[in-house]
Image (cartoon, rainbow, N blue to C red):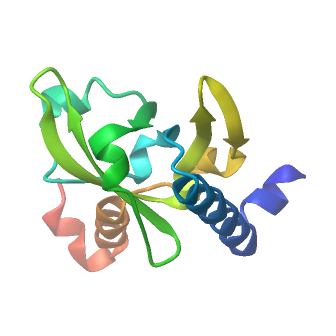
Amino acid sequence: MISDIIEQESYKELIDSQIKDIIEYLIDNSEEFAITANLEAMEFTPELPQNIKSQLSKFSLYVLANYTYTTIEIIDDNKLTFEAGFGSENFGSKVTLPLHSIFQIIIDDAILYLNPLATVDKFNTSSKEKSLNVFKNNPKNKNLIK
């Protein structure tokens, strides 16, 4: 069954490596690109205002071009960061996301890479959400949660 493969940590590491290699190749060749990524795995610094974040779909398109392209970094071999402006007011935020949460890499309206792992919920929650879940699952904290 496919879930037996794509839910394995070793497969996630393989995908991280593939996506890292592709992005580094694109950067080395000065090729701008776009991604769609799982919003649930993304972190925004500063946090996006709710009126902007609520307009983003679970798999939103991010065009990594011009200024945003110059801010791309791969950190810890498994995360992508870039700066972008959001909404009509161009609210600036640094985006950080795990590489395996990138669903598509796109060049000129053509899909270069497609990653089914971006749809696996267990790998695609933000660190804030994971921390909250750990807190909620501790029986000693039951009286602190409404």
Q: Where does the image place residue 127, in percent across and percent down from the top left?
A: 35, 65
Number of marks present in the image shown: 0
Q: Where does the image place residue 125, in percent across and percent down from the top left?
A: 43, 56
Q: Which of these two is toward me, 43 or 129?
A: 43
Q: Where does the image place residue 95, in percent across and percent down from the top left?
A: 30, 52
Vertical relation: 11 (above or below) 96: below
Q: Where does the image place residue 16, in percent across and percent down from the top left?
A: 62, 65
Q: Which of these two is toward me, 5 or 52?
A: 52
Vertical relation: 103 (above or below) 123: above
Vertical relation: 129 (above or below) 93: below
- Residue 107: quadrant of the picture: top right
**Which residue appears at 39% of the width and 38% of the height?**
65
Image-based side of 129 in relation to 44, left or right? right
**Which residue appears at 14% of the width and 43% of the height?**
92
- Residue 79: quadrant of the picture: bottom left
Q: From where the camera sits, is residue 33 visible?
A: yes
**Which residue appears at 41% of the width and 42% of the height?**
39
Q: Which of these two is toward me, 103 or 26?
A: 26
- Residue 66: quadrant of the picture: top left
Q: From where the camera sits, is residue 48 visible?
A: no
Outermost residue toward the right in this view: 1
Image-based side of 61 in relation to 43, left or right? right
**Which residue appears at 83% of the width and 60% of the height?**
4
